[in-house]
Image (cartoon, rainbow, N blue to C red):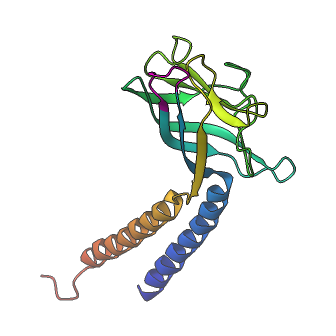
Amino acid sequence: MKLVKKLGIATASAVIGITGVGASSAAQAVQLFDFQYSFPSYEANGTSISTIGTLITTDLDPVKNNYTITGITGTRTVQGITERIIGLLSPGTYGINDNLLNASPPLLTQNGFAYLVSGSGEDGNGNVNVFYSSFNEGYSEFSSDADYGSFSVIPRPVPEPYTVGGSLVALGFGWWTKRKQAVASQKKPHKGIYL
């Protein structure tokens, strides 16, 4: 019984160790950036456009010094109406977006990244494209209403769900081993005299 207990502990430790290795590899494959931007309106009495959310990217490409944006969440507010960001648009689908985030300024390319919102967006269909203009030296949306403004990102740590999952597997295995031992001890025949 002690051998089974030791095997259970050793196996649980191995599961946690393997899961820990997988978690660090998975964490390195994805980066998260909180982003926000605010663009004033061209019109004197117009409403500014502001957006806040999170960009999900690949790891840094050291040759190109940029990340590829693979996902997005957040909200966009225009004319006092807040729209929910539904998802990222594929590269080349709106405003020739390339969905790249540079590691150093300017943070976006001239093609920018594009996403879909729950409202009408800039083109009336819910599409939005955010880009950098080297001519105007500023960031803006692909829209006739938005002027040039600020765009910023802050990297944030990636949660490691695999570590938590590995710990739960190990705990479950430990419980299963103890339960199996308890059931086995109840099935042992009694030593005694049977009449």
**Residue at far front of view:** 44
Question: Residue 60 location, x and y as percent?
Answer: 75, 52
Give the quadrant of residue 187: bottom left
Give the quadrant of residue 185: bottom left
Query: Residue at 15% of width from left, 82% of height from top?
Result: 194
In terms of depth relative to the viewer, which is nearer, 65 or 71? 65
Question: Residue 111 location, x and y as percent?
Answer: 74, 28
Residue 45 covered by magenta stretch: yes
**Magenta stretch, residue numbers:** 41-49
Position of residue 175 in the picture relative to residue 125 (left or right): left
Q: Quadrant of the C terminus?
A: bottom left
Residue 24 covered by magenta stretch: no
- How many labels sit on residues? 0
Give the quadrant of residue 107: top right
Query: Residue at 74% of width from left, 30% of height from top?
Result: 98
Position of residue 168 in the picture relative to residue 34 (left or right): left
Query: Residue at 45% of width from left, 68% of height from top?
Result: 167
Rendered view: 96 above or below 177: above
Question: Residue 24 location, x and y as percent?
Answer: 63, 64
In terms of depth relative to the viewer, which is nearer, 88 or 154? 154
**Residue at far left of view:** 195
| Predominant secondary structure, magenta span | loop
Question: Residue 103 location, x and y as percent?
Answer: 74, 51
Q: Quadrant of the N terminus?
A: bottom left
